Amino acid sequence: MTFSALRMSGRIALITGGGGEIGSAIARRFSAEGARVAVADLDLAKAEKAAADITAVGGQALALQVDVGDAASAQMAVERTVEIFGGLTTLVNTAAAVTPDGTAETLPLEEWEKALRINYTWAFLMCKYATPHMRAAGGGAIVNIASQLGHLHVAGRAAYCSTKAALIAFTQVLAMDFARDGVRANSISPGFILTERSSRRSGGKENARRLQGPLHLLNRPGDVEDIAAGAAYLASNDAAFVTGTDLLIDGGYVTFKGVIGADGRPTM
Ligand SMILES: NC(=O)c1ccc[n+]([C@@H]2O[C@H](COP(=O)([O-])OP(=O)(O)OC[C@H]3O[C@@H](n4cnc5c(N)ncnc54)[C@H](O)[C@@H]3O)[C@@H](O)[C@H]2O)c1
């Protein structure tokens, strides 16, 4: 076996939600490890900024606008990537809508269906269009970004928790369906990662660090780079024997299910 500092050399990656905080960190990391990256996001300005950050330091990146909930748009993102970079080996599904809180009784059907479309059906669509190109490339890797809340569920967040749990199950079936094509499929379940989106409920990043940190065994929220490192591992040949797994990058959140006390000790 050979080891390369540029583990993603020769890879062509498409990252949905690539303009977001976790998605853009994954794009930067893949580029730093040698991949060419298509950064696809509903918000084109964010995709362009993420791609520009990569090209500014000598990487190869392309910005695309995509609505992952729309089949034609998802297909277009795949086809444009293949047209411009000459193939596709790697798909990272990061996009997610902000899902409204609510119970089965209070959540409007339209909101439930929208959450399913953007947080779950999108992965199905992206894979539908991407896998033929991965097979043509002789194999590839899919990484779906799920959540710790796909493992431990919380009251009032039916749409988010159930779409993320379903995404983990879908990834395992993907692994089975495409193993013969040399396509590996894995998911990542992040713990609380300090981004604008996740911090909004806590009233900003500083409050979120204080409130969410102690729910993790390592007594801190995660950084976007923690997730980017895991995605690069799963997408690279270092994970050549890894498929159908869910990688918890959660600082021990799911194992712990407790709170770190003021004295720094775990309490239940
Ligand atoms: N931040 C956390 O604590 C955390 C924890 C667990 C899981 N996650 C997951 O990580 C992923 C990224 O989260 P983030 O915190 O970086 O959020 P973010 O809001 O920064 O990124 C999400 C991106 O998805 C894009 N997007 C939304 N709808 C889209 C659509 N229809 N088509 C294409 N793109 C669309 C947004 O424009 C945004 O750029 C999400 O799937 C989220 O559920 C985050």
Image (cartoon, helix red, strand yellow):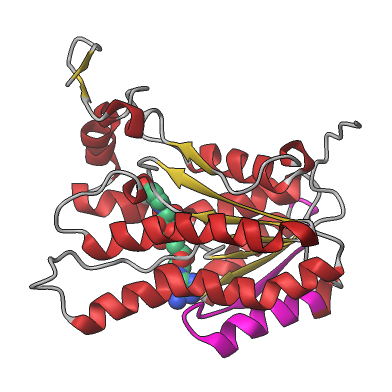
Where's residue 63, x and y in %? 66, 72
Q: Residue at x 78, y 42 (%)?
A: 237
Residue 86 visible? yes
Question: In the current view of this chain or complex, which residue is farthest to the left?
Answer: 105
Where's residue 150, x and y in %? 35, 51
Q: Is residue 215 above or below residue 181?
A: above
| Bounds of the magenta segment | 57-82
* Among the 4 quarters of the image, the one containing residue 49: bottom right
* Among the 4 quarters of the image, the one containing residue 81: bottom right
Where's residue 24, x and y in %? 57, 55
Q: Residue at x 63, y 76 (%)?
A: 128
Residue 45 visible? no
- Where in the image, quadrant-wise, is ligand 1 located? bottom left
Report how many numbered discs are placed on residues in the image.
Answer: 0
Question: In the current view of this chain or complex, which residue is farthest to the bottom?
Answer: 72
Q: Is residue 44 above or below residue 222?
A: below
Pick the quarter of the image with the N terminus: top right
